[in-house]
Each structure stands twice: as structure tokens, then as C-alpha cells.
Amino acid sequence: QVQLVESGGGLVQAGGSLRLSCADSGRTFSTYGMGWFRQAPGKEREFVATISKRGANTAYADSVKGRFTISRDNAKNTVYLQMNSLKPEDTAVYFCGLSSKYLCSAYGCDRLNEYDYWGQGTQVTVSS
């Protein structure tokens, strides 16, 4: 049974940092590709970052490259999103997703419909 629980969101000033965590209660976390997406009010959920099952491959949306870093600790069944130099436009609910698809596990993936499970989301608000 997969259950994803995000944490670490909050209110931060522009230029600040936050680290999001997503913990998986399942026992096969290390076999899955993981990703972070976000959804701002009135907008569709969009890709932020993805990581392959062993962490060898990562990919980022252009809007966060150089500012955000995705990582994972398979011993703790947890994926992280370190967010630095935050901007007001980063304000959104952030969701972690888990994908069992082979290519996503091997390389990560950036498409919403490639993910099988989602967490409940954590709010990130960046003030100007």
C-alpha cells in the first residue's frame, strides 16, 4: 500500500529557502520514479522536478533550474525538494508523485499522467 505524505511547506519571504519532504509508507520505494509538481490557484498542476529510482537521473522545469534540487534517501523512503532563491511566483500547493512505470523508474518523468500515486500536497507561500 502506497501512502505519500508531504511536509515542509510554509510562508517564506522572497529569496528564502524551504525544504519539502515526501515520505512513502510502502516497502518498495527504491523501485519507483518520483516527482514534484505544483498547482497555483486557477492553474493546472505543473511539473517541477523528477528523480529516478536510485537518484542517478534528475530533471527540472526551466522555471526552477538552478534554484531547486530534488534528492532521495531510499533508506528512509523519502524524496526531498530543496528550494532556494524562492520567488512569489513559486507560490503553490506542492505535490509529490510516485510512478511505477519502467521508464519513469529508470530516468524519471515529467508528465502528470505517468504517475500512479499522489500525496495530499503542502502549501508554499512566498511573499514579496
Image (spheres, rainbow, N blue to C red):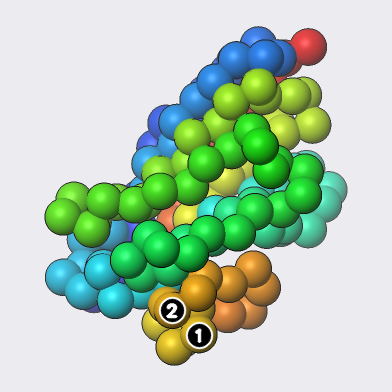
Q: Which percent across, then down, holds residue 62? A: 77, 49
Total marks drawn? 2
Task: Report the side of 83 relative to 61 (left or right).
Answer: left
Q: Which percent across, then down, holds residue 108? A: 52, 70
| Residue type at tag 2 | Ala
Residue at x 26% of width, y 68% of height: 29
Q: Quadrant of the C terminus?
A: top right
Front-lying residue, 81 or 128: 81
Task: Report the side of 115 relative to 117 (left or right).
Answer: right
Residue annotated with mark 2: 106
Residue 7 vertical placement versus 114 (above, below): above
Task: Report the side of 54 relative to 123 (left or right).
Answer: left
The reply to whether discs 2 and 1 touch (Cβ–Cβ < 8 Å) is yes
Snapshot quadrant of residue 110: bottom right
Residue 62 vertical placement versus 101 (above, below): above
Q: Quadrant of the N terminus?
A: bottom left
Snapshot quadrant of residue 59: bottom right
Residue annotated with mark 1: 103
Q: Residue furthest right?
A: 42
Q: Is residue 86 visible from the viewing direction of this image?
A: yes
Q: Which percent across, then down, holds residue 65? A: 69, 43
Label 1: element kind:
helix
Front-lying residue, 35 or 116: 35
Mark 2 burial class by Cα count in 10 Å: few <14, some 14-19, many 20+: some
Which numbered marker is on residue 81?
none
